[in-house]
Image (cartoon, coloured by chain):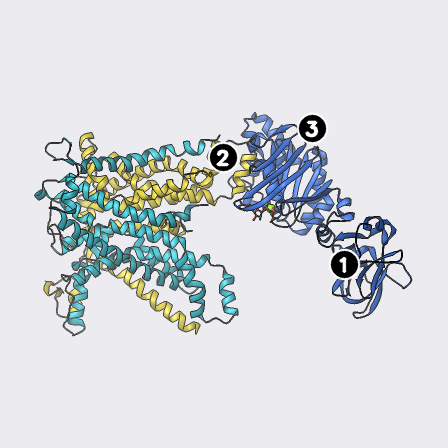
Chain colours: A cyan, B yellow, C blue
């Protein structure tokens, strides 16, 4: 009958195949091969790269990165969720200077993550904060950014700085979508603001498929997080493999750009594929529910 | 009661605003070589961790900005980023709009799978794309070129275009399409003469969004650009000079200047498209 | 000749049946109104005819051509929507010209037709304006212009007047009717407004729950509703439906409506009741204008208490309380009566209808 709907998809599908499927296939072949940049011939050798990454030579740095990545994903997304919802609630309604606050609070959405890698650095804000803590308060204390608790917190807070506004906007959109009558009904029945919050507002936010969808995207993106931990490898002087700020992406970047490791492209492809597989399993599972936002 | 609630609200918002502004303000101020650290201490010195950091400066100077423009690196980076972003977004629009239209207008099996597939593009580790493209671009001579970067950024821009445009097409009341359909117009005529003219404002928003996303992207640029096509976001990190090799001592005032310069257009654009912001950041899932 | 015929047409949205086994014949050049309650399946019926939906079952024919699978653009029908659905980025002129332009009509021909249509609809002065710059009524005319410009076989209209204010609506009703007679085109008009249906249509099809309840001229629908629901839907105020039970003693057949209300059955109806048993539950239908206030001695009367007086300007509606139900009576404006008084209601026997209380079907 009418095939136009499929014809219209062809250009996009072609591009998606070129920039998505093709590199994945290439990476798969590469991951099954022995490959050196000096002898650009790909020799398929089997799963030895996978064994090396998961159990062998590269296993310690791989599993280290898995831990670091997980910590950042969970920490950042949790903080973003909580902060974002609070900000969304705070911005909901009519009050003075609302649009000013709104404009300020969406600014981080424009900021490049790499810029935040700089902004969150010891030399830009922490020197001032520490100086203030040390002298200004007269307490003689300071934050030692070389402590894992400190630098993980900073990395997570930096990510939250960037993305809490996203959750804030989503929360706001959800709240604005709640029919006014629901609030009025609650009010007429004499519900306190806390009860209104518990019975009307909170369930709408938590059950929103849009929030679920956006959280899924956040998890996917945080899983690939690069710029902020990358910047912190510099601030902390962590240029060795397996450092405490090596997310998967940072690990692969180190392998790719440092001549020390002889450009192990096959190993990088392997790590890239394994990490993609992990997040893809999550994504497909989560999107099955949350991609509903696009079905109508 | 209501007053108390508002006080809490303002408390939260003022704190959050400070939280947003403070790092940016500090960076801007340091780009003019003002360091307030020593003032905070009251002793003319500032600290990082336990270590003495410096005596700072209180005299504003535009030297970093002058340098950014004088050695001509900055305008060049802006040019590179703009060309790459605009060409990538243009390609994404050309191939993405028909798909968006198909997603928005027709009912057929497999659409959900295709949508999930499109979103799954996002799960691909950048290195699973980078490594093959690194090799292939080397062979094709696309390494460090505008074309090469425009293509690679389609990974980013295609989903933005398809999913956002889908939403804009869906916003047009269905009766408008039906009226056109009953008037005897073919599907292509409806798309060309009715749908596209009506989504032009949305299209502008999409272009601006994709522009910001590309402008801000760092990792692909880090690996695949060199002296010729280096982008703004790379310049932010490595300073205005040419590419850095390995680890180097960084000049923070220079970084802050570059950061500030990179921020300005992005912030202006985001505030310009305020109306479409939610749609942009949620890939059209929320309005 | 253009005649539209639906036979056994069904359409479901998911599990929701919107139209069920619908048979409908729209005659050539008639003004057919589809009337029914909200959610009854009127729009769905229209959209099926237009081809915007395809039926799950059944057939749709134009004359002898089966058009189930024919795409809308090949059906030569046009539709006017409730929200006008004008193309917002085009001027009125471009909107009206659109159906011709997409058919690659020569430019002079397009201009000529647009001119004709706009003078017919008195919108020549609006041609350069965009929809946003026009009032609702003006937009409605432009939408009509777009619909008639290509001389369709069938006009379809889905509540086209419901976004207009009352005065404009009345004016447009008459104009539409005149237009349809002038253009001699089959018109199917969906509305849930019975006044609109009664005043415009050649015939009315009443659709409820996706089923056709009755089709007939406005007079038939008004005077002989096939169904208690139609009776209660049409008329302003609608027909009284009084619950009663059938009784027989000796040769007399009577209806017990309430304690003070035992009615002798008019001769015209007796033949319809022969099959019914004593004690059968019925509904007596009588229009408010077919009841009068009279005195004892008339054959068909009941006593009831005045409950409420409503003045509608050109008439007075008196609500009587009879047993547990309210009976409305319509009389001339300015009628004086006191609430709480008792009065005799006299029914016009020839206008009385009986419905089966259970099925609602007319007897
Ligand atoms: N696109 C749709 N998807 C799902 N259900 C639908 C759709 N369109 C209509 N329905 C359902 O089908 C039934 C008939 O709808 P339809 O729009 O034909 O009614 P209608 O008589 O035109 O009502 P109204 O006077 O409110 O316009 C309703 O129950 C409605 O909820
Ligand atoms: Mg309807």
Nearest-to-viewer mark from 1 and 3: 1
- How many marks are shown on the rendered structure? 3
Q: Which of C280 and A251 is in front in this view?
A: C280
Q: State the residue in front, B13 or B27.
A: B13
On the same chain, marks 1 and 3? The answer is yes
Q: Which mark is residue B190?
A: 2
Residue with the most extreme right position = C297
The answer to which quarter of the image holds residue C159 is top right
* B113 over B259 or under it: above or below: above
Which chain hosts label 1? Answer: C
Q: In this view, does A290 lie to the left or right of B127?
A: right
Left or right: residue B72 compared with residue C138? left
Q: Residues within 10 Å of mark 1 (few under 14, many from 20)?
A: many
Label 3 vs label 2, nearer the camera: 3
> Real-space Cα distance between discs 3 and 2?
30 Å
* Quadrant where the image shows the N terminus of chain C: top right
* Residue at the spot 76% in from the left edge and 54% down from the top edge: C239
């Amino acid at each position: 009958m009418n095939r136009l709907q499929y014809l219209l998809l062809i250009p996009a599908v072609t591009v998606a195949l070129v920039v998505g499927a093709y590199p994945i296939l290439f990476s798969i072949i590469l991951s099954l091969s022995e490959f050196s940049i000096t002898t650009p011939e790909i020799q398929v050798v089997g799963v030895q790269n996978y064994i090396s990454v998961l159990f062998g030579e590269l296993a310690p740095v791989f599993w280290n990165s898995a831990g670091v990545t997980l910590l950042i994903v969970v920490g950042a997304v949790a903080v973003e969720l909580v902060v974002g919802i609070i900000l969304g609630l705070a911005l909901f309604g009519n009050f003075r200077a609302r649009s000013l606050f709104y404009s300020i609070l969406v600014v981080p959405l424009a900021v490049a993550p790499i810029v935040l890698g700089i902004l969150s650095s010891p030399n830009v804000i922490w020197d001032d904060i520490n100086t203030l803590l040390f002298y200004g308060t007269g307490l003689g204390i300071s934050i030692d950014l070389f402590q894992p608790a400190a630098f993980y917190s900073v990395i997570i807070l930096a990510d939250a700085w960037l993305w809490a506004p996203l959750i804030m906007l989503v929360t706001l959109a959800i709240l604005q979508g709640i029919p006014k009558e629901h609030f009025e009904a609650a009010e007429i029945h004499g519900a306190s603001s806390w009860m209104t919050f518990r019975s009307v507002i909170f369930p709408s936010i938590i059950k929103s498929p849009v929030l679920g969808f956006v959280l899924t995207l956040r998890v996917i993106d945080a899983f690939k997080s690069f710029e902020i931990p990358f910047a912190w490898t510099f601030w902390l002087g962590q240029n060795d493999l397996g450092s405490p700020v090596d997310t998967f992406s940072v690990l692969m970047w180190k392998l790719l750009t440092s001549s020390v490791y002889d450009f192990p492209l096959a190993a990088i492809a392997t790590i890239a594929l394994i990490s993609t597989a992990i997040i893809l399993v999550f994504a497909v599972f989560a999107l099955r529910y949350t991609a509903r936002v696009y079905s109508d | 009661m209501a007053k108390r609630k508002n006080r809490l609200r303002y408390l939260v918002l003022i704190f959050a605003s400070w939280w947003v502004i403070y790092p940016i303000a500090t960076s801007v101020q340091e780009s003019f070589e003002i360091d307030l650290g020593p003032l905070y201490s009251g002793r003319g010195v500032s600290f990082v961790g336990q270590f003495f950091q410096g005596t700072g400066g209180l005299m504003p100077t535009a030297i970093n900005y002058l340098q950014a423009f004088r050695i001509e690196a900055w305008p060049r980076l802006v040019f590179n980023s703009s060309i790459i972003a605009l060409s990538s977004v243009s390609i994404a629009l050309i191939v993405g709009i028909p798909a968006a239209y198909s997603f928005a207008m027709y009912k057929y099996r497999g659409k959900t799978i295709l949508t999930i597939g499109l979103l799954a593009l996002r799960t691909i580790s950048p290195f699973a794309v980078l490594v093959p493209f690194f090799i292939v671009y080397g062979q094709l001579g696309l390494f460090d070129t505008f074309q090469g970067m425009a293509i690679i950024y389609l990974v980013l821009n295609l989903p933005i275009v398809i999913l956002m445009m889908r939403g804009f097409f869906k916003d047009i009341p269905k009766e408008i399409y039906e009226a056109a359909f009953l008037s005897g117009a073919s599907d292509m005529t409806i798309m060309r003469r009715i749908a596209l003219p009506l989504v032009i404002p949305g299209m502008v928003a999409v272009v601006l969004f994709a522009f910001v996303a590309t402008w801000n992207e760092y990792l692909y640029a880090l690996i695949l650009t060199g002296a010729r096509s280096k982008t703004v976001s790379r310049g932010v990190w490595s300073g205005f000079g040419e590419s850095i090799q390995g680890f180097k001592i960084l000049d923070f005032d220079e970084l802050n200047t570059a950061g500030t310069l990179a921020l300005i257009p992005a912030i202006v654009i985001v505030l310009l498209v305020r109306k479409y912001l939610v749609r942009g950041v949620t890939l059209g899932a929320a309005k | 000749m253009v005649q539209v015929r639906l036979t056994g047409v069904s359409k479901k949205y998911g599990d929701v049946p919107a139209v069920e086994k619908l048979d409908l014949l729209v005659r050539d050049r008639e003004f057919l109104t589809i009337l029914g309650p909200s959610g009854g399946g009127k729009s769905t019926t229209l959209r099926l005819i237009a081809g915007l939906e395809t039926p799950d079952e059944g057939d749709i024919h134009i004359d002898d051509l089966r058009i189930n699978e024919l795409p809308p653009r090949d059906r030569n029908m046009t539709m006017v929507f409730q929200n006008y659905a004008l193309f917002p980025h085009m001027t009125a002129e471009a909107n009206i010209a659109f159906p011709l332009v997409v058919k690659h009509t020569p430019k002079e021909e397009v201009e000529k037709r647009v001119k004709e249509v706009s003078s017919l609809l008195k919108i020549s002065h609006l041609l350069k304006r965009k929809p946003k710059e026009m009032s609702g009524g003006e937009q409605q005319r432009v939408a009509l212009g777009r619909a008639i410009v290509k001389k369709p076989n069938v006009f379809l209209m889905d509540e086209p007047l419901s976004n207009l204010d009352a005065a404009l609506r009345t004016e447009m009703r008459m104009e539409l009717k005149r237009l349809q007679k002038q253009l001699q085109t089959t018109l199917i008009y969906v509305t849930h407004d019975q006044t609109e249906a009664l005043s415009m249509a050649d015939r009315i099809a009443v659709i409820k729950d996706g089923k056709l309840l009755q089709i007939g001229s406005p007079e038939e629908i008004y005077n002989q509703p096939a169904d208690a629901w139609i009776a209660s839907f049409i008329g302003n105020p609608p027909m009284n439906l009084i619950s009663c039970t059938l009784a027989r003693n000796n040769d007399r057949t009577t209806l017990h409506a309430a304690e003070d209300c035992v009615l002798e059955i008019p001769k015209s109806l007796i033949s319809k009741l022969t099959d019914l048993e004593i004690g059968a539950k019925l509904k007596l239908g009588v229009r408010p204008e077919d009841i009068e206030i009279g005195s004892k001695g008339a054959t068909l009367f009941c006593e009831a208490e005045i409950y409420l007086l409503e003045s509608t300007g050109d008439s007075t509606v008196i609500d009587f309380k009879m047993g547990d139900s309210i009976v409305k009576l319509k009389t001339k404006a300015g009628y004086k009566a006191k609430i709480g008084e008792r009065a005799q209601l006299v029914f016009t026997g020839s206008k009385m209808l009986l419905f089966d209380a259970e099925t609602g079907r007319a007897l």
